[in-house]
Image (cartoon, helix red, strand yellow):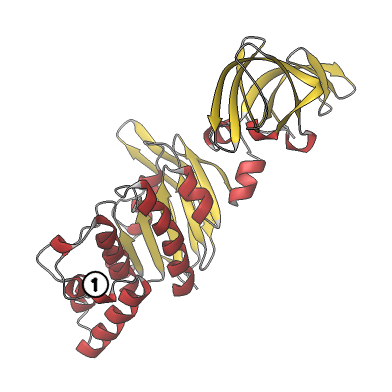
Amino acid sequence: MAVIEIKNVAKTFGAYTALHDINLTIQDQEFMVLLGASGCGKTTLLRIIAGLETATTGEVWIGGRRVDHLPPKDRGIAMVFQNYAVFPHLTVFENIGFGLRMQKLPNDEVKRRVERTAGLMHIDQLLKRYSGELSGGQRQRVAVARALAMEPDVILMDEPLSNLDALLRMEMRAELKGVLAESNTTAIYVTHDQVEAMSMADRISVMHKGEIVQAATPLEVYRNPAAEFVAGFIGNPPMNFLPATPKGAGKWAVGGQVIDGPQKNKALNFAIRPEDLRLADSGLTARAKVVEPLGAHLLVTCDIDGALFRAVLDSDMTVKPGDTLTLAPQPDRVRWFDPDTTRAVA
């Protein structure tokens, strides 16, 4: 069992606090993605788990064993870096087997593990080549195979696909998720790419300014963001926001219209995803400013009472800049946020 427990972990660099009291449990064989913009603390947290960085306060437990006092080699982990760190003077076989040689495993065991993981990553035909002869995607596969060959309890990955082109990145997402599921390994994956996070993760931990704002399944994070930051960060385009004024009895003035909402008596922020809007006879009155055809859909950027607002509509609809649109939100997809705490209230 490789359950990972992060308990009250904080990290400061002088006067700068990179991590604030992080608490997170990652279940055995779970694929957890740490998602956030550059500088949010996700790589610092990964390095603390790996033992490459020391937490200022807090504890790290792996498989029921406290490991934050142990060196990386004794934590039962393997790591895949952004730059792959594949040795150019070694063959693919020697690269994959490098860590196994350091452990002084017998030759037949090294051969078995190298061939097995090379087969998983579909590079078994490349074992005699040197890394200089490989493409970026092949070097990435070698780096993952080298980590898996160690048969670790936990594999840590720091933006391993960021150096690949878009098409190869998409191919490797699916392949990597399948390989890790087959290896029965607990995985922590760091990325700033929300498409990677949404498509690969069992759960996503959304990080912002050194804190975990929400940890949930991809669908939960997308449909029910726990904070305004998550709503505005996840989704392309992200959620729309409008100020809402209470009118009593669960009625709210939003964008010049009155709609149903929570029973609150203070101002809130109304939020809805662009794809959860429909043209209707009643709803929010918007003026189209920019219309972008995107194949099956139109992305329409509108103005509602001076606020920017986006709607994703079917491409067979005729919409032109300057048109007045009536946009009806799908009621069960509306989110409400407290502007003081920025947290969701319904």
The residue lying at 79 percent from left, 33 percent from top is: 331
Query: Relative to 260, is 58 above or below?
Result: below
The residue lying at 49 percent from left, 69 percent from top is: 181
Q: Quadrant of residue 247?
A: top right
In which quadrant is the C terminus drawn? top right
**Residue 70 seen in render:** no
The residue furthest right is 249
Amino acid type, label 1: Ile
Q: Is residue 195 left or right of residue 296?
A: left
Q: Residue 98 in the image: x percent, y percent?
A: 19, 72
**Residue 262 seen in render:** yes
Query: Relative to 30, is 291 above or below?
Result: above
Query: Relative to 136, is 113 above or below?
Result: below
Circle 1 residue = 96
Q: Is residue 126 left or right of residue 178?
A: left
Q: Quadrant of residue 121?
A: bottom left
The residue lying at 37 percent from left, 36 percent from top is: 38
Q: Residue 328 in the image: x percent, y percent?
A: 77, 26
Mark 1, secondary structure of its residue: helix
Q: Residue 235 in the image: x percent, y percent?
A: 55, 37
Q: Is residue 188 left or right of residue 158?
A: right
Q: Which of these two is toward me, 84 or 290?
A: 290
The residue lying at 33 percent from left, 30 percent from top is: 15
Q: Residue 111 in the image: x percent, y percent?
A: 24, 84
Dot 1: within a 10 Å radius of its alpha carbon, few (fewer than 14), some, or many (20 or more) residues? many
The residue furthest left is 89
Q: Which of these two is toward me, 294 or 233?
A: 294
